[in-house]
Image (cartoon, rainbow, N blue to C red):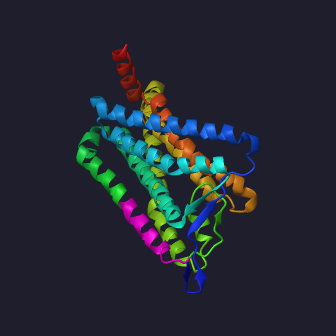
Amino acid sequence: MKKDNYTMITKIFLLGFENLHSLKYLFLIGIFLVYCLAVSGNVFIITLVSTCKKLHRPMYIFLTQLSFLDILLITIIVPNMLHIILNKGISISFVGCITQFCFFAGSEMAECLLLTVMSYDRYLAICSPLRYTSIMDFALCTKLVVLSWSFTFVMILIIALTMCTLQFCGPHVINHFFCDFAPLLELSCTDTSVVQMEVFFMSVPVLGLPVTVIIISYVYIIITILKIPTITGRQKTFSTCSSHLSVVSIYYGTLIGIYLLPHEKSSMATNKALSLMYTVVTPLLNPIIYSLRNKDIKVAILKITNKMN
């Protein structure tokens, strides 16, 4: 397809993982098992919170949204990845590639905002326990969830519309296992400064502001915990936010690793490994962390287990 003397690409070839050789089927089975466990774990969290009345609280409503996003994220990535591993790369339509990027970026943005909302929830619960129920009621909880999704939709719509104004003439090969922002822009044969500028400014409310809010929230949380006179009291209070802190650390740790490492050919394997971490492994770890480190979740699981027995 030609447009303004450029040959526009209609298909993109994703290289995926190179040099797997004899480990290909072992890696394939491993990724498939991780996908099944991640989806099952997050569906279990959603079902548990939905059916257990004691978990009908803001923190766990936010948790169900996080689980839904984890299911969405891993489902966007893994099915195509399995095809890539099996066939040593696959061709995907250009529209399909843009669509995958939009859903991927949207789930990442929404998760950043949701983790920020959860940190604010933990801040209120620990630093203002007497006012917590009056501030973080169901109405505010719903508004924060809707606001997170709405803001994400607007941001992705702006990026998608701007990218549609670009001309993509090749090469048609992306050395990755999914359609990410930077590899896509490398295929453009026109000026990408506008969309890059948009993403830069959007990173402030989507990434910079959430990180700042999370850090400030946990500074106040730590200060409040240190004021508790007994070690038992400190441990009990910290346990209410340890799960969220673990998830935040893993999630932002891998994201920072991706964007701080130099994007050179020598670091491509590292970039893929880190991308694999936050697109596949993190959705598996989140329900495990919340199941093992959250007292209310463990109590709810024990009750269901006892009823079954």
In front of the other: 203 or 288: 288
Q: Is residue 164 magenta?
A: yes
Residue furthest top in the image: 309
Q: Residue at x 65, y 52 (%)?
A: 272
Q: Is the C terminus in the top left, top right, bottom left or bottom right quadrant?
A: top left
What is the tally of numbered marks visible in this picture?
0
Is residue 21 shown above or below 206?
above
Q: Is the N terminus in the top left, top right, bottom left or bottom right quadrant?
A: bottom right
Side of 233 relative to 80 (left or right): left
Report x, y in % for residue 55.
32, 32
Q: Residue at x 58, y 70 (%)?
A: 185
Report x, y in % for residue 111.
44, 51
Side of 266 relative to 104 (left or right): right
Q: Residue at x 60, y 51 (%)?
A: 275
Is residue 253 shown above or below 36?
below
Which residues lie in the magenta part?
151-167
Residue furthest bottom in the image: 4
Report x, y in % for residue 148.
36, 55
Q: Is residue 258 magenta?
A: no
Give the dominant element type of the magenta stretch: helix, strand or loop. Answer: helix
In front of the other: 4 or 305: 4
In front of the other: 48 or 202: 48
Report x, y in % for residue 76.
49, 51
Q: Does any portion of residue 212 appear in the rendered image?
A: no
Is residue 88 shown above or below 242?
below
Q: Does any portion of residue 86 appear in the rendered image?
A: yes
Side of 231 relative to 16 (left or right): left
